[in-house]
Amino acid sequence: MRSLFWRILATLWLALAIVAGLSILLGRALNQDAWILSRHPALQGLAEQLVQRYESQGPSDTQSYLERFRHRARIDVQILNDTGHPVVEGTFPPRAAAFEARHPNKRRLPWRRLTEEYTSPASNESYLLIYRIPYPELDAWHRGSLLWPISALVIALVVLTLFSLALTLSITRPLNRLRRAVHDLGQTAYQQDSLSRLARRRDELGVLAGDFNRMGQRLQGLIGSQRQLLRDVSHELRSPLARLRVALALAERATPEQRDRLWPRLSQECDRLEALISEILALARLDAEPGARQPIQLRPLLDELVDDAKLLDPEQDLRVECESGVRLDGWRDMLERALDNLLRNALRFNSPGQPIEIAAHQEADRLLIRVRDHGPGVASEHLTRLGEPFYRAPNQAAAGHGLGLAIARRAAERHGGTLKLENHPDGGFAATLELPLSPEF
């Protein structure tokens, strides 16, 4: 496997090597006459010094200085005026000048010929200075002059390599932690605080770690809720199945008259089991892909639900408060199932002679649908758990399977809203669906 660490490090090092090579090539390209004139220690300020000496001391003194300079620096110097005639004899021998004239190709000469123009500020005269440096002397100077740049380059490469190493580690180490966290998440061994230190980083990797932490916590919560749901389903199914087994065992040993009395019991237990399985399937379908949203006219939907409720309990007084033009985009079957469960829950606990109020109105960009009964309500310590699958408050233990409010809550969440459950200040219980009118797809 190709490690990202080595790829990043190699890329940075290659970039540094290219920059260093280009720097050396650029230095060599600049190593021409101007570079030698400006960098060679024997030539720095030499033109100004020679012209000043010539104008102040005369040709003889200047010639003596040039000979001493030739002996010390091993560089021949000629000084010409603006007409091209030498103002001093110089140190370049005539035989060498004749040899240079016969070989115009500079590369074949044993010395390097450099020229420099200088204008005297005192006399405003222009002079041409010609330097001839033997190649052995120039090479010796090159070796000494390149020592410091090469040393500086090596030091820079070492420092940049350490910086590249630190940069590479700062990228690959967090990625390795994320990889281990992904592996632990797949093995259900994820620890919620495993990336807490990485999430404190103030860069993209810190943001990624924070998002991954939240995703891991959410997945763990979903996995835990699914496991709890399976345990609850198995527990809820065990009771009607056990009663069916007992009734069947009794029917095997019973007389025909006794069997006739047991058949209604068996039919009742089958109906309970069927209703439970139907609610479980309805809850599971809410997690499936429901398809595209469709416009829903709310008032006709509420009227249909009220008509169905009156068939179950004709004595109940159901009051609907909803304007005819209220609509939202969503899934009609899902919303109908949620409202039907809320309405059935209100029918089950409403006090006789009291109305059940169904109200729908808009607040800003949200639609609020509230179903209120005038029953005993729910103790405050149980309100927070209402809506969990198979949870029933103590005063609701004999009613339903604890899935109606769970289905309503899940339907609200699929629409991008919430289900709010509370005791009404004037008595009774109120369930409010808060749904967005313009959901984000």
Image (tube, helix red, strand yellow):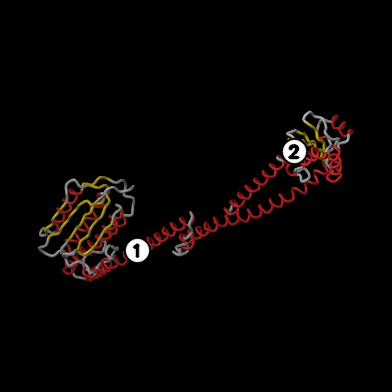
Marks 1 and 2: which is nearer the front?
2
Residue 166 in the figure: left or right of residue 440: right
Towards the viewer: 74 or 21: 74
Left of 15 or right of it: where is 103?
right
Q: Which mark is residue 230?
A: 1
Q: Is residue 47 above or below residue 314?
A: above
Give the image location of residue 241, x and y in percent: 28, 66
The amino acid at mark 2 is Asp
Categorize mark 2 by other alpha carbons within 10 Å: few (<14), some (14-19), many (20+).
some
- The one nearer the camera, 245 or 353, is 353
Q: Is residue 341 above or below residue 129?
A: below
Amino acid carrying label 1: it is: Leu
271 displayed left or right of 194:
left
Which residue bears the numbered disc 2? 33
Residue closest to the eye, 79 or 105: 79
Looking at the image, the residue that sits furthest to the top is: 83
Residue 398, how many percent across, how many down? 21, 68
From this view, report whether residue 296 is shown above or below residue 88.
below
Q: Quadrant of residue 427?
A: bottom left
Q: Position of residue 139 (x, y in %)?
A: 80, 44
Would you say 46 lies left or right of 174 here?
right
Q: Residue at x 33, y 63 (%)?
A: 229
Q: Does the image show residue 430?
A: yes
Viewer-proximal residue among 57 and 276: 57
Q: Secondary structure at mark 2?
A: helix
Residue 344, image quadrant: bottom left
